[in-house]
Image (cartoon, helix red, strand yellow):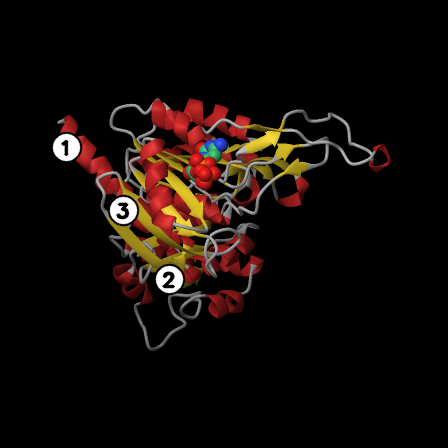
Amino acid sequence: MNPLSGRRIVLGVTGGIAAYKAVEVCRRLVDAGAHVTPVLTEGALQMVGATTFSALASEPARTSLFDDPQTPIPHTVLGQAADLILICPATARVISDIRTGRSADLLMATVLATRAPLMVCPAMHTEMWEQASVQENISVLTDRGVLIVAPESGRLAGGDMGHGRLAEPATVVAAVEAALSSGDLAGRKVLVTAGGTREPIDAVRYLGNRSSGRQGHALAAEASARGADVVLVTTQPGRAPGGVRVVAVETAAEMANACEIEATNSDLVVMAAAVADFRPADSASRKLKKADGAPEVELVATIDILALLGAAKPEGQILVGFAAETDDLVANAAEKLARKNLDLIVANDVSKPGVGFEHTTNEVVVLMADGSRHDVSLSDKREIARAVLDAALGSLSTNLNQEQ
Ligand code: CTP
C-alpha cells in the first residue's frame, strides 16, 4: 500500500513566492491517497488564493484560528489528528517561530498542538537563507528532529539566481513518503536502472526502443520512500522522481560504466532498463546526408550489463533482472534467471494489453532463485514496484540471516 494512503497531512503554507508550488504539492499528496488539510497564513494569502487549495485538497483551506464557529479550537483538532505537518514553503519567519514556540497564528498553534512529525521546506532568497540567525534556527530545528527538506539552487523570485529555492514538488512529496513509510529499506543502498538506451548511428539519429523508464522510476521512488539510499541510472533523467541521485546516460556502454561504479557497494541492484542488445559498429560524428544514399549499418553486440553484474556479484547483494517476453514467459525468464546468476527476475508478457512499454500499468510474474513465484495482476507500476521490492527484501533478509 502507498505510505500516504489515508494518512492525514496538515499542509502549512506561508508567505513566500514559492507558495504557488505548494498547490502542486497539495495535488500530488491527494493523488497519492493522503487526506490533506491546507492551513494558510496571512502571508500565504498574499501569494495564493485559499480557494485554489480548497478545490484541490481533501477539505477546505483554513486561514484563521477564529473563522469556524463549529470548531472553536481548530489547532488541537488538526494537530491531534495529523500524521505529519508539512510546512511548504517555510519562510524565515515561521522557522524562527518554530524555534521559539511563538504561537502567532493557526499554523503555529497547530505546530504546537501536535505530536506528529514536522517537516519544513525552507524557501527564501540566498541572503536570507545564509543569515547566521536563519542557519542557527535550522540547526536547532534539525537537532530537535524536525525534518528539513533542503532548499535547492536555481532561479529565485525577481529573476535572481542562487541558493534558497524551494525543493521541487516531487522531492517534497518523496520526503513525505519517506517520513511516513515503513522504512524497511533504511540503511540500504539500491541501484536502479531505467529507460531504453540509445545507440547512435550519426550525430542526430539513434537505434532505440519503446521503454519509457516508468517502471524503473517507480522502483526508484518506492525504494527511496522506504528509506533506501537510491541511485537511479536512467536514459530519462527529465522524468526521474525526486529524492534519488540521478546518473543520466544514453548508451549501453555509458550505462555499463555507471553500473560498474555504483553496483559494487549496493545491497540491491534492479536492472529495469531496456538495454539495447546491439549497437551500430560505427557512428558518424556528423549527420549522414540523404543524398549519399541509404547507409549500411553494421551492428555489434553491446555488453550484457546484467550478466556482467551477475558474474561479479558481491556476497549478500541481491540482483534483480527483468524479462520482457512475448512467448513462453516463465520458461524464458527462468532460463535468464539462471544464466545471469540472478536472485529474482521480473517477467512480463509485453504482448498483453496494458503491459510493459509505454503503459502506466504492468502485470508481472516474479520468479525467485529458490524456485518460488509471485504473480502480480495488472496494476499501477508503483504497485508492481512495491511487490518487487517486497520480494527482494525477503531475499535480502535471508542473506543477512545467513551472514550472521
Ligand atoms: N540487460 C542488460 N544488458 C544488455 C541487455 C539486457 O543488462 N545488454 C538486462 C536488462 O536490463 C534486463 C535483462 O537483461 O534486466 C533482460 O534481458 P534480455 O535482453 O531480455 O535478455 P537476453 O539475454 O538478451 O535474452 P533475449 O534477447 O534472448 O530475450
How far across and down, in percent of the image, does residue 34 sit? 36, 61
Residue drawn where x is 77% and y is 27% of the image: 286
Q: Is residue 207 left or right of residue 211?
A: right
Residue tagged by mark 3?
390
Q: 244 or 335, which lies in front? A: 335
Above or below, 97 against 142 in this view is below
Crowd around label 2: few <14 · some 14–19 · many ≥20 (10 Å): some
Residue drawn where x is 52% and y is 41% of the image: 195
As drawn, the label of residue 33 is 2
Q: Between disc 3 and disc 2, whose residue precedes? A: 2
Residue drawn where x is 50% and y is 40% of the image: 274
How far across and down, in percent of the image, does residue 356 sit? 47, 52
Q: 349 or 126, which lies in front? A: 349
Above or below, 305 against 74 in this view is above
State whether residue 176 appears in this view: no
Q: Secondary structure at mark 1?
A: helix
Three-letter amino acid code of the residue under disc 3:
Asp
Q: 216 or 104, which lies in front? A: 216
How far across and down, in percent of the image, does residue 5 sit? 33, 60
As drawn, the label of residue 401 is 1
Three-letter amino acid code of the residue under disc 2:
Gly
As drawn, the label of residue 236 is none
How far across and down, in percent of the image, does residue 103 sit? 35, 54
